[in-house]
Amino acid sequence: MSARPTTLDSRTDLLQIFELAQQLRVDSVRSSTSAGSGHPTSSLSAADLMAVLLARHLHYDWSAPDNPAGDHLIFSKGHASPLLYAMFKAAGVISDEELMTTYRRFGHRLQGHPTPVLPWVDVATGSLGQGIAYGVGIALAGRDLEKQPYRVWVLCGDSEMSEGSVWEALDKAGRHQLANFTAIADVNRLGQSGPTELQWDTAAYARRAEAFGCRALVVDGHDLEEVDRALTTAADGQAPTVIVARTVKGRGVSEVADQENWHGKPLPEDLAERAVAELGGVRDLRVRGPRPPEATAVAAPAAGPVELPRYDVGDEVATRVAFGKALAALGARPEVVALDAEVGNSTHAEDFRKAHPERYFQVYIAEQQMIATAVGMAVRGYRPYATTFAAFLTRAHDFIRMAAVSGITMALCGTHSGVEIGADGPSQMGVEDLAMMRAILGSTVLYPSDATSAAALTAAMADIEGISYLRTTRGAYPVLYSEDETFAPGGSKTLRGGGDDDRVTLIGAGVTLHECLAAAEELAADGIPARVIDLYSVKPLDADALVRAASDTGALVVAEDHHPEGGIGEAVLSALAASGSNPAFAHLAVTGLPGSGTPGELLDAAGISRSHIAGSARALVERR
Amino acid sequence: MSARPTTLDSRTDLLQIFELAQQLRVDSVRSSTSAGSGHPTSSLSAADLMAVLLARHLHYDWSAPDNPAGDHLIFSKGHASPLLYAMFKAAGVISDEELMTTYRRFGHRLQGHPTPVLPWVDVATGSLGQGIAYGVGIALAGRDLEKQPYRVWVLCGDSEMSEGSVWEALDKAGRHQLANFTAIADVNRLGQSGPTELQWDTAAYARRAEAFGCRALVVDGHDLEEVDRALTTAADGQAPTVIVARTVKGRGVSEVADQENWHGKPLPEDLAERAVAELGGVRDLRVRGPRPPEATAVAAPAAGPVELPRYDVGDEVATRVAFGKALAALGARPEVVALDAEVGNSTHAEDFRKAHPERYFQVYIAEQQMIATAVGMAVRGYRPYATTFAAFLTRAHDFIRMAAVSGITMALCGTHSGVEIGADGPSQMGVEDLAMMRAILGSTVLYPSDATSAAALTAAMADIEGISYLRTTRGAYPVLYSEDETFAPGGSKTLRGGGDDDRVTLIGAGVTLHECLAAAEELAADGIPARVIDLYSVKPLDADALVRAASDTGALVVAEDHHPEGGIGEAVLSALAASGSNPAFAHLAVTGLPGSGTPGELLDAAGISRSHIAGSARALVERR
């Protein structure tokens, strides 16, 4: 390579940009061949699109990725990482050596699919159909929250356009008329295992994008002038735009171009050599694309005091109600935003809308997009609270999983947990959410039983790193704690007993804590003193309190309004096992299919009501 | 009520059908008011649509719901159950007494949202945006598998059209040109908490449906003639149809019609009385709609013998490869169908395509629709195997959850589990799937470690009731079992040791079993005899073998390529706790965020490789 690379800038002639595109192709081939895995052909199809974008349209300060006015580029087709990393090299932020010796290798940052371990990557991609959704979230944050001039560019594949999440996202781009948002669909006709559903029917993609309220521009993705014109139009501030680019997978390498069976395969070394030659050899072009405009000067709004509502012990208040009020109060912190999936009158997220309409986002019934919007806003430094029924958060499981890979900090609230909801029946009952949320990397899982703790934990979530989850209950139950009690992740409360003479420990959270308290009354009448623990922090767990209870009482009963797998009972067992503690143990959970009924009938039928808890406790005590 | 109800049939004048619609309204009001909960206003908007459908277009034998030629009616807007149950009453299959005294009550079948506990209901609904997806699956089964003349009618709400899953589904209706499929969108403008995203923009819905390849018919949903014409057109056999019906929520009851804040609320008794009066009072009309056509006589194809491939012990074969070959062999059973989310060359589901193309369905990258199609086919008696990467099954979590509520039997296979996949990185690694699948009601979770067991368990899944899940591994590992070994849900294999002198038990499945075997070699060299258990059945668990191992060796090490929450370790702890068994216990699982690397590097970095297993075992043994 020459010692002084040629530098292109935004006035560079398209002929030179073609050379840049060829360089991106060459580097995509070289890096994946050197790594022995990767997706060169998926990179080759989009190289022309990205070369024009990089040189002429992406307003980005590569030395300051945090510039608030800088554009955002998301590779929704994350498997085209060779192309993205080749762009990074052309931008001068990674070296050829890093590209050639670390791509896809252990311990290095140029992973198989991009993640935010790289400073120029906002979100992890690789689960297809998510990049557009995140892009919409970032665009919304930019226009409506930050009021910064940046644009969001999302490169997506054609295969992923089959994902419903893409249409949830474009629907929102259209609804909000996000003129700062552009999706570039690389329609290369070939998916992983064969032709895509729509192949080169670019008109069909365009019709769909338009039907969802976006502007569609169909281009030949290898005609640099056409691409340049489309990107210019996309940036005209008029409408959210979907550029539908007809491309050829493997473009530029005649032996693989438009051929099946080349997805996700590096070119063998000999073929790679011929490919590089056909592409004109290794180049060392550098790009200095357009700089971001001046950032909007926004005075950081002052944080007001967060005054949580207070509750009187004994009053009956639903935790979902307390959540809503606390969330509204938390809006005094200007970074807090709330997202709703059209159930705000049930989840009580609407309390936030009433107090802070400018930071409340109605995503309608589109849970995947609700999470993606939250992720996009978190990328821009906001603290999102996204809320729906616990059962319906399962709809967004893959987005929550990927948000954890992205290292996102956000708060989720799932209401209407368990069979407790009553007459609506099993479709509305969240009885798998604890398992789902506990298994999310780095998550915090909270499950308050009364209004005071629900309010305190809702507020605490604004300072928890990673993904935190609050599980709330439909019905109203007595307030247990006075306002001076404190609650923190990893804590618990011993609500009854606590001395040496306790003979059994009853552990509950949410509705089952109230059942545990009632069971303890029954047991006391039988002369069996019971300790009752409010395990409001399901992850992390208060292992000390559990081990102490095991040691003091020798017998633990866990009751939870959730399936037995992956919930509170197994969390307790894990904590005890890690401590080498082995009490007698009974686990009451929902094992059958519930129907409709009153909360009391359903708790009893599921075997998690006070009488079952007391019965289990008696059996454990008698057995010892 | 009169002793002899008036009976309407398909030649009945529309004026009489109006009376039927009013009856459906009256009964919707009465049942929900009597229950004290429910969604009368969401029922009133669709009453005219359903009255015309029921009397003139739904070819259904109410006395024989199993008639293979009978139409299918799915209430995607399951909360409109008062309307559905009012239709059942009009059809004469439930009594007014059942409607008025059992709706939404404990222990009864007229639940808040319909489930297949009712013989006229195919699938549980209530998680919005799913009914169209199931309907597409049933329509595909009817046309391409059963070749029966039935039609599928899906009533959906307008709010749920925001769900991406709706567009995944309509895309498939369009792609397959399912002329036996009709969706009827009840565009009543009001969602749960306010106006819907598109309100009465029926043209927008129509554009979208057309862009996805369906025929759209916009009608006034209260003009019986228009509705009748549209339903007639929908049944003309020409195209999949979306009827976009402009309606009024609460139609017919002037005090609530088109009013906000009436979603999901029964009318108070006094208002209900006025409503019934306004609607013309209680009626007792019965409907005898059109009968199904003659069922197609199809000779049940003979089941051939299932000859599973055999593997030689020691050969290196990936379990995903063995799955694909076994699935292809299993195709000898004519009820077996395979569904793919465009990764068949990775999952090896494509082996089935090559062997049985007529029963292979490429759903493209649309995991929710893949599961919904499987559910639809299961409703029609087929045994679906739906396959994608384990990580991407999380995309369909809500559909899998609802399939369990529906009591569906289907087999799922998740490939590329764990960090073992190597260079592709965390977005592609299934490390939450065991938690998700264990927590599904009634599920069976299998996780083979070699080709012989993978083949046997793939075959076993065809006879497992409920939702079964097979977890497979990307890489090739030695075959451990000869062809004469048997494997069954709830079983395990002790691969090493088993006698009294074992001092520790190593428990693995999938890739970690091979690591356990290698660790046992290391331990043997140190003079520590170790038992090794292949826990290929994660749910149900072989509790006996675990308790015996705990008793014999006193120390258990579980290693799993999954997050610690909800996986194998917690399953083992639950089984031991239920048995009162308390061995020393170590749990090795993936606790950090992996990157790219070789499988060996990543297993080691996650602390689940042979050296970590041996180290944990040594520590346990020394501690005792």
Image: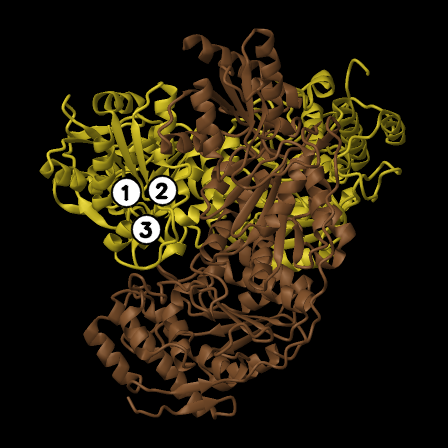
Chain colours: A yellow, B brown
Q: Are marks 1 and 2 on the same chain?
A: yes
Which residue is the site of mark 3? A419
Asked whether residue A211 is in view, the answer is no
Which residue is the site of mark 1? A323
**Position of residue B397 measured from the top left corner of the image (x, y, whole percent):** 50, 47
**Which residue is at 58% across, 44% downward?**
A132
Quadrant of the rendered image containing residue A311? top left
Which residue is the site of mark 2? A413
Mark 1, residues whose alpha carbon is within 10 Å: few (<14), some, or many (≥20)? many
**Position of residue B220 measured from the top left corner of the image (x, y, whole percent):** 48, 79
Q: Secondary structure at mark 2?
A: strand
Q: Is residue A22 above or below residue B440?
A: above
Asked whether residue A84 is in view, the answer is yes
Q: Can you name the residue that lies furthest to the front here?
A: B500
User: What amino acid does circle 1 point to?
Assistant: Phe
Quadrant of the rendered image containing residue A58? top right
Q: Are marks 2 and 3 on the same chain?
A: yes
